Image (cartoon, rainbow, N blue to C red):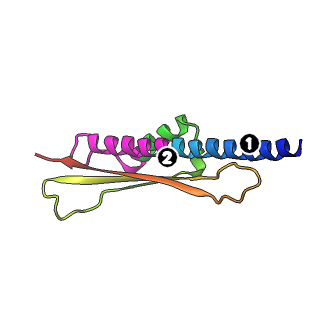
Amino acid sequence: MVEFAVTVVALLMLLLGIVSMARAVQIYEVVSSAAREGTRYGIAHGPTSKSPASITQIRNVVLGELTTAGLDPAALTIDVSWPSDTLVINGTDILVQVSYPFTPQVPFTMIPKITVSSGSRMLAWRN
């Protein structure tokens, strides 16, 4: 019975660790997808379009993607910028970076908080 108790505890911790890391991968997928959606929206409504998007509108698109996935909107960090690139002559870059803190839920362990982050950068080409 002692061997069974030790084995069950070890297996449960291993199982919870696997589930927790799967959750981290799922959060990363959601964060990277939201960053890409914000970048696409910013490109489609770029500075040279008829209805250019503001940083607030792009953030709202990213926030909408993340809240539908069940992430806490208060913990999100969303940065939108249009970095200048000397190699880009005929267009504008947009960069959307999203980060979210994740704490693995494995009992009896001291796993620190992980910041899951992703960014997306695209070029809006002008003719």
121 or 29: nearer the eye? Answer: 29
The residue depicted at 54 percent of the width and 56 percent of the height is: 115
Task: Name the residue beneath numbered marker 1.
Answer: 12
Q: Give coordinates of residue 32: x percent, y percent.
A: 43, 45
Viewer-nearest of discs 1 and 2: 1
Coordinates of residue 46 in the picture (x, y in percent): 26, 46
Outermost residue to the top: 68
Asked if the magenta segment contains residue 68, the reply would be: no
Within-10-Å neighbours for mark 1: few <14, some 14–19, many 20+: few
Outermost residue on the left side: it is 127
Image spot of residue 88 (x, y percent): 17, 58
Crowdedness near tag 2: few (<14), some (14–19) or many (≥20) residues, C-alpha within 10 Å: many
Total marks in image: 2
Which quadrant is home to the N terminus? top right
User: Dot 2 lies on which element?
Assistant: helix
Task: Residue 39: name its quadrant.
Answer: top left
- Quadrant (top left/top right/bottom left/bottom right) for the C terminus: top left
Residue that sits furthest to the bottom in the current view: 86
- Whether residue 16 sits left or right of residue 82 in the image: it is right
The answer to whether marks 1 and 2 mark residues whose Cβ atoms lie closer than 8 Å is: no
Q: What residue is at 54 percent from the left and 38 percent from the top?
A: 67
At a point 59% along the width and 46% down the height, the residue shown is 21
Mark 1: which amino acid? Leu
Judge by depth and name the residue closer to the eye, 68 or 108.
108
Outermost right residue: 1
The residue to which callout 2 is attached is: 28
Q: Amino acid at mark 2?
A: Tyr
Q: Main secondary structure of the magenta part?
A: helix
> Is-magenta flag for residue 55?
yes
Say which element carries label 1: helix
Residue 52 at x, y percent in the picture? 29, 44
- What are the residue bounds of the magenta stretch? 29-58
